Amino acid sequence: MTVLLHTCCAPCATHCIEVLCALGHTPTLFFSNANIAPESEFYRRAQEVTKLANIANLPLIIDNPDHSEWLARVAAGLESEPEQGARCARCFQYALQRSHRQMRASGLDAFTTTLTVSPHKLSDLIARIGREISESEYLNLNFKKQGGFMRSLELSEEHDLYRQHYCGCEFSMRPLAD
Ligand code: SF4
């Protein structure tokens, strides 16, 4: 199957690419992260994803980052929510909806997301949101299974990829523990 892989960052994508290819799928990376602030950080992460796409020889689409729209549609009223709270659920939905739209526009078969690699992210919630958007087109993979996160760390080191220390939005700017 041709699969649009919503890509939050290069380190998380390393392992997801490996899994998708092992399953016989053909991934297209989709860097759609209007959540990221400041803008310089968006471009730093995008640059690393470009590097990874070149290493893996895979197509990459970079979505236009409209952070003002993201603030209005996702974060408004939820600025003080903790991570894994209501703001994050809306953030996942925003990214997955854009990914679904891009999957259709690119004529691909399915979509999924790197977000489930992270031990900080709620895989069941992400799966439910993906299925609500499209039961038949969401490829439900929990990438953190079978040591997925550790594998992503190994591959990131191997490829010398930048690993950020906060999730993405300005409300998450405190160090993440591994
Ligand atoms: S903490 Fe991360 S998942 Fe939650 S709203 Fe911010 S960028 Fe999105």
Image: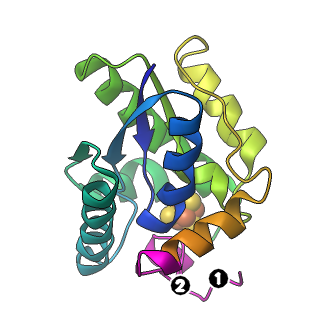
Where in the image, quadrant-wise, is ligand 1 located? bottom right
Residue at mark 2 to residue at mark 1: CA–CA distance: 6 Å
The spot of residue 98 in percent (x, y) is: 36, 35
* Residue located beneath label 2 in the image: 165
Q: Main secondary structure of the magenta part?
A: loop
In the rendered image, the vertical position of residue 43 relative to residue 142, given as above or below: below
x 31%, y 78%: residue: 41
Q: Residue furthest top?
A: 136
Q: Residue furthest bottom?
A: 175
Q: Which mark is residue 113?
A: none
Q: Which residues are magenta?
A: 157-178
In this picture, residue 72 sits left or right of residue 131: left
The spot of residue 142 in percent (x, y) is: 71, 42
Residue 51, quarter of picture: bottom left
Looking at the rendered image, the quarter that the C terminus falls into is bottom right
Q: Is any part of residue 79 visible from this angle?
A: no
Q: Is residue 145 magenta?
A: no
Q: Residue furthest left?
A: 64
In this picture, residue 171 sits left or right of residue 117: left
Helix, strand or loop at label 1? It is loop
* Residue located beneath label 1 in the image: 176
Mark 1, other Cα within 10 Å: few <14 / some 14–19 / many ≥20? few
x 59%, y 26%: residue: 139
Q: Is any part of residue 160 visible from this angle?
A: yes
- Residue type, label 1: Leu
Helix, strand or loop at label 2? It is loop
Residue 29, quarter of picture: top left
Name the residue nearer the viewer: 143 or 35: 143
